[in-house]
Amino acid sequence: MISTSTIGFPRTGPAREMKKALEAHWAGTSDAQALLSTAAGVEAEAWRRQADAGIQLIAIDGTLYDHVLDATFQLGLIPDRFQAFKKSTAASASNASNGIAAGLPLYFALARGAEGATACDMSKHFDSNYHHLVPELDASSEPVPDWSMLLDRVKRAQGVVGAERAVPMVVGPNTLLGLARGSFDRSALLPRLVPAYAQLLKQLAELGVPEVQIHEPILTLSGSEELAADCSAAYRELAAVGLPINIVIPYDDVPEETYRWLVELPVAAISLDFLGVPGADYGSCTAQLIAKHGFPKSKRLGAGVIDGRGAWADDGKAARLVASLRELLGADQAISVQPSTSLQHVPYDLSAEPSVPTGLSRPLAFAAQKLAEIVAVAEAVQGAAPGSIQPLDLAAFTGAPEGVQRELPAELIKRAEPYEQRRPKQVQYRPFPTTTIGSFPQTPAIRRARLAFKKERISPDQYRERMAAEIGFCIGAQEALGVDVLVHGEAERSDMVEYFGLKLEGYYFTEHGWVQSYGSRYVRPPIIVGDISRTAPMTVHEFELAQGLTSKPVKGMLTGPVTILQWSFPRVDTTRKEQAAQLAMALRGEVADLAAAGCRVLQVDEPALREGLPLKASRRQAYLRWAVDSFRLATACAAPEVQVVTHLCYSDFGDIMQAIQEMDADVLTIENSRSDNEMIVALAGSGYPRDVGPGVYDVHSPVVPSVGWLADRIRSFLEAGLMGGDATRIHVNPDCGLKTRRWEEVLPSLRNMVAAAALVREEV
Ligand code: GLN
Ligand code: ZN
């Protein structure tokens, strides 16, 4: 009783067709029908690939922007600020023939904002690198469902793969509520959402689908234990419709207490993630849960044994795992072989790559290859003579669930002198020293030069000269503005991870390995394929050029080990922790070289530090231990006189304050301007003793902040009690790097920032 299934597929199209279609639509050069027809083509191609690979139950994936937004939108849970926009577009679209096309202006307004209504917030989807749009609810939220988008997709899919194989998928009501923001009572809202879902299930049953996938990854989180009563009531009501339900729970194992009641839900199938985060040192406990508590014979077990978010092929473990499950649960147990998560987190097709490295410890596999693996695993287990596939010892399968809390060698991660002793030996500042976070505008001229270099139309020397000219310009501009601590501007870096990855041994860069980050924004994570090492200095030349032009300190600028790891596909034959340590050792060499070149202030960015935090509270300490230690391993070799700065952004850091302290950096620059100084108040409240540079303005906005507004921000840091009011320890800087801005915005913004610092300096 072994079958095959998927639970999601890349929605990008094999050649990024969706990105191009969306951007053309937003630019006004193609209409809604053109966009919908491209989307239909991209979706059909994805379904066909799955059918051709031999997948039996195909998840009918597809979205114009984000699948969480799809659910919120089709439930009609539209925040109030969009009501005026909704009315105005509804009036002008009243004679449109296609209901889906008529809804698109509102749909995209939610995603991207509209006149008078800011877009919904974005948030990382569990611990993946995908971002969903955050649903906004309140106590009076009342769904007004219209499931046309999803129903239309299912009808098209039935035409492509046949009604018996097309399985609709939808974000479940518990997960939607779990991801939502607003003041509402979850238990009160859930019974209001469920009838809207029941209506969907009825309509799907009428279309003759074999079952429906309801995705409930929220059940992986610590705390999901408490959803028992609500969740059971909801699923009883949904099951009453009569359409078989497959409840799909990707991204991690479920807590043991949750597992106990999960298996009692009145659903036809339960899909579980057997792998968790690729390269995690704590593994996944799903197999152990099944070994310990069993699994109901009456339900199909969706065995997520093919890695949905790693770039690597299975090494035979998947078949052994399924064989073990079969041995444990009996040959008559229905089991479907499937990926651990949606395949949306991996690139489309490895065979599109021109130069895949050879001699790897095992092959790479992207979405298309993983389909073949699913089918191969099912066939192997199904057709195997008894005993021919050596089963795994399930009880031992996961290793230590809490991870091993081992520290890196103390002598390597400790600075030569403690903070209090070394700080007085470092650069001293006037009150409110000004600085920036690293990058200056990546202008069209810089991009053209990079392309010409890549296409070998200009020589490496010519390229270096152009970058040197950019560096000279940046230094001159900062001198003219009167900034205190300068940067070289990062013109030579297309991306803060790619730049280092290309210079380090052990990395492979794809040409087409795009993965959706959100909407039409795709990223191409590099793949760690071997041991990491540094063969030559990576940033020293640019630092020396810049420092040679000024007597003010120029910051050495590196991306930290955790961030490089977090934005790469890791190896799976060794732990993330091990790979972070290798990256740290490589960076440590660079730190030493920069210091030898005269670097007095050294910034090591770790914007992704918070992102890597495991979903389960019980696993966080171990992660933070090795993440912090890796940062220290990279930086601790700096002499006491060298000031180590770190930069954090993109997340709320309130829950990892202790870890930030333990990073032992001399200066912390942190994104702050879009918050209400929460982090600043928290730092002040905890008596944080080190220099802080809270972001004073948002780099995502083209608006030039005024001197008065900026001065108020700076004053508010003093009012919050930061640094006990010692203004020489409060740095003034933007939230983040300026690479996405134009010089026309950067120059006046920095001029105002420097003027605001001068103004407030007079007051202290
Ligand atoms: N130094 C980097 C820059 O300024 C930091 C970017 C980031 O934090 N994401 O671009
Ligand atoms: Zn940043």
Image (spheres, rainbow, N blue to C red):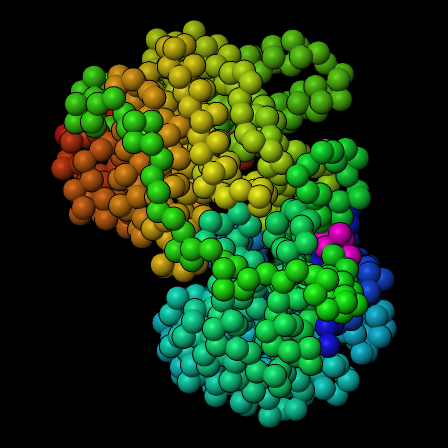
Residue at (85, 69) in percent of width and height: 160
Left or right: 448 in relation to 376: left
**Can the viewer see residue 172?**
yes
Residue 514: x, y in percent? 68, 45
Left or right: 441 in relation to 480: right
Judge by depth and name the residue closer to the eye, 331 or 299: 331
| Residue 475 versus residue 84 in the image, above or below | above
Tell me the quadrant of the picture where the N terminus can be found: bottom right
Dominant secondary-structure state across the stretch colored magenta = helix
Judge by depth and name the residue closer to the eye, 42 or 621: 621
| Residue 12 versus residue 237 in the image, above or below | above
Left or right: 250 in relation to 41: left
- The magenta stretch spans residue 307: no
Judge by depth and name the residue closer to the eye, 576 or 406: 406
Residue 306: x, y in percent? 65, 58
Tell me the quadrant of the picture where the C terminus can be found: top left
Occupied quadrant, residue 527: top right
Residue at (23, 44) in percent of width and height: 683
Residue 484: x, y in percent? 32, 20
Q: How many callouts does the rendering have?
A: 0
Occupied quadrant, residue 475: top left
What stretch of residues is rendered in magenta? 367-372
| Residue 414 versus residue 275 in the image, above or below | above
Residue 68: x, y in percent? 57, 65
Find the residue positioned furthest to the top: 548
Find the residue positioned furthest to the front: 387
- The magenta stretch spans residue 369: yes
Occupied quadrant, residue 106: bottom right
Residue at (77, 67) in percent of width and height: 385
**Can the viewer see residue 94?**
no
Residue at (54, 90) in percent of width and height: 237
